[in-house]
Amino acid sequence: MNILVVSPHPDDETLGAGGTLLKMKKKGHKIFWLNVTDVTEELGWSKDFIEHRKEQIKSVRKFYGFDGFYNLAFQASKLSQTDEGGVIASIKKVYEEVKPEWIIIPGQYDAHSDHRGVYNCCMAAAKAFRAPYIKRITTMEIISETDNGFQETKFYPNLYVDISDEIEDKIKAVKIYDTEIEDDPFPRSIGNIKALAQNRGASCNCLYAEAFCVVRIIE
């Protein structure tokens, strides 16, 4: 099975589905990573940060052993001001190349506008009559975004993946993003990331789990 995870920003793929990707890779499935936005000097990021981000992405790609990586490099935090048709076309091009059977995408109601925009564009490109190879679409739970989304549309998971054997490796991957992790009680702390996985594990009778919402499954 070809599995494609779509991240609005680098680190979302690991926070939301890192354990699942590692588990699927061990099972012999192919995993692919599509990142949609990136940092630029025009938005105020320093050259040093941009270079460090490139090294982070390089290290994360190697850590997971991704079978393919795509970076659309649209401007971070500006996706809502970007031509939506162009974003959809770029995502569809990746779909056509990878032919994923399972796509893992951010949530429709995440707090960050980039997340919501990526969801909408991913879904527009994944219409069943245009991408019949996509058999499963799930949204992932991204700490600090999904849990801070619109209150009337809480995240209600209906798919759990046991990552008890992968949790420590997921944490290693998280630590590669040293610029995004801080101490408790910051949401993206190692303690809080493990606590969320433990809480989701308690919901499905395992030590640690990642939770997803099923958007579509075709059997």
Image (cartoon, rainbow, N blue to C red):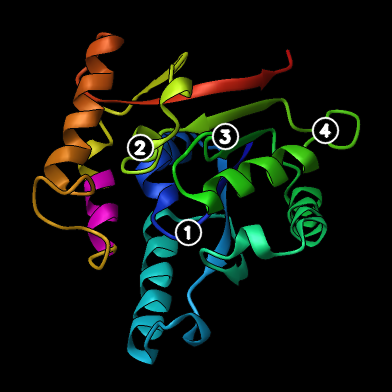
Determine which quarter of the picture holds residue 122: top right
* Residue 184 image point, x, y percent: 8, 47
Q: What residue sits 44% from the left and 48% below the top?
A: 13
Q: First in sequence: mark 3 or mark 1?
A: 1
Asked if the residue at tag 4 contacts the one at tag 2, i.e. Cβ–Cβ closer than 8 Å, the answer is no
Hey, which residue is sitting farthest left in the picture?
Answer: 184
What residue did someone put label 3 on? 108
Instruction: Write the start and end of the magenta stretch as one range.
Output: 170-176
- Disc 2 marks a residue whose amino acid type is Asn
Hey, which residue is sitting farthest bottom in the picture?
Answer: 47
- Disc 1 marks a residue whose amino acid type is His
* Residue 59 image point, x, y percent: 36, 68
What residue did someone put label 2 on? 148
- Disc 4 marks a residue whose amino acid type is Lys
Q: SS class of the residue under badge 1?
A: loop
Of tags 4 and 3, the one toward the viewer is 3
Q: SS class of the residue under badge 3?
A: loop
Instruction: Give the CA distance from mark 4 to mark 1.
Output: 23 Å
Q: First in sequence: mark 2 or mark 3?
A: 3
Q: First in sequence: mark 1 or mark 2?
A: 1
